[in-house]
Amino acid sequence: MAFGLVSGCSWFSWLPWVGDDDEKSKLEPAKLQKFDAEVRVRKEWSGGIGDGLGRKYLRLDPVVLADRVYAADGYGVLEARDRFTGKRLWRVKLDADGGGFLSGLNFFDRRDPSFVTGGVGAAHGMVLLGTTNGIVIAFSAADGAELWRAEVGSEVLAPPVGGDDLLFVQTSDGRLIALEKDDGITRWGFDNQIPILTLRGSSRPVSAGGVVIGGFANGMVAAIREGNGEPLWQHRVMLPQGRSELDRMVDVDSTGLLSNGIYYVVSYQGRIKALRVADGSLLWEQEMSSYLDLAEGYGHIYVVDEDDVITAIDQRTAEVVWKQEGLFRRKLSSPVAFSNYLVVGDSDGYLHVLAQSDGRFIGRRKVDGDGLRARPWVADKLFYVLGNSGSLQALEIEPR
């Protein structure tokens, strides 16, 4: 996702005729404030994964499968490591091959040759990557052997996910595609028209109970029967409004959250909504603008909005329980909730630990000098963080 777009008109605030000094000062990132730490973030192990995530605002989250953690860089390196010791178990290196007639072009940043843009996915004993050339590649989770490649026609910006016996891939041109897990052959595709201007990103499909749900750049979400691609319902999270194309951007780039038969979804410049999975009916909504994934815990839904304000919303009543504005405009990662904690990273490489109960800061650690964009992955007591430089770390939170 291109942060130049998600910042909206404030991206142009450096121009002399846009805004004034007072307005510019309001847009400065918040300075970190001291607090009494209640927990310690301890490093269990660390290791380097290739050349990191590059300049394209890639969010290649690590993923855990059984006793292994898998991570990739933006330039074709994929590794499996023992998640307890950090020992490298296997490593593969992909070449940036010609996966399409536009494969030699890089419209977003010609200085950055990264081409892995969708990953890391894990399902059915496989690890999966998607590329800017519209290729999905499946590897054996056991030894890294390449199993198959599938052309899906357009850039893959989110990890492929697994269903009952299929894999689901969302592409930048608004398609949700079901692939056979054994050979990558397309079983069905669901098309959704995209606007002229969109954020550079896409949500990760969510699969459960024979239904897959995807969010799209036109502000829609759709529930589709996994086996045959039959649309079950569609819901517009936000209707585009305003005169300019920037004003009318309502992308659903945040991965929705499925819990107890309810699907929680948020759009950029739009709303957060709770929808009944059975029929897509609306249970509640709140004004909200976000492009980052949601998290759940303590009966709350946690949202990081476009200004990096963290909000906890009661899952049942839609009431705002608390807000934390101390990380304003620090370019946060998606949050992850576990135990009593809510964890987010920022562009300066700090990992922040908040209490789920009231949002107060209780811990902090500098993890990567190049910053943190990828969402941490939690397994048991450890959580795994991939820094922008390619540093993969296993961390644990301990009470002081």
Image (spheres, helix red, strand yellow):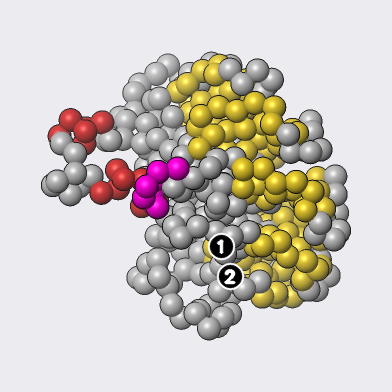
Q: What residue is rendered at 23% in x and 44% in y?
A: 13
What's the magenta region? 241-247
Mark 1 Cα shell of 10 Å, populated few (<14), some (14-19), many (≥20): many
Q: Nearer the viewer, residue 327 or 44?
A: 327
User: Residue 214: horizontal and vertical position, in percent?
Assistant: 67, 50
- The part of the image, by quadrant, that contains residue 126 is bottom right
Q: Earlier in the sequence, mark 2 or mark 1?
A: 2
According to the picture, the residue beneath numbered tag 2 turns out to be 154
Seen in the picture, residue 280 relative to 196 is either above or below; the reply is: above
Q: Which mark is residue 29?
A: none
Check the image and name the residue furthest to the front: 243
Residue that carries the numbered disc 1 in the rendered image = 172
Task: Name the residue nearer the viewer: 226 or 287.
Answer: 287
Decide whether the magenta segment is chiefly helix, strand or loop: loop
Tell me, yes or no, if residue 284 can be seen here.
yes
Name the side, left or right, on which 276 lies relative to 314. Answer: right
Q: Is residue 28 magenta?
A: no
Q: Residue at x 55, y 51 (%)?
A: 218
Residue displayed at 85% across by 54% down: 164
Q: Position of residue 198 (x, y in %)?
A: 47, 55
In the figure, is residue 261 to the left or right of 114?
Answer: right
Contact check, label 2 and label 1, Cβ < 8 Å: yes
Kind of residue at badge 2: Ser
As shown in the figure, which amino acid type bears the numbered disc 1?
Ser
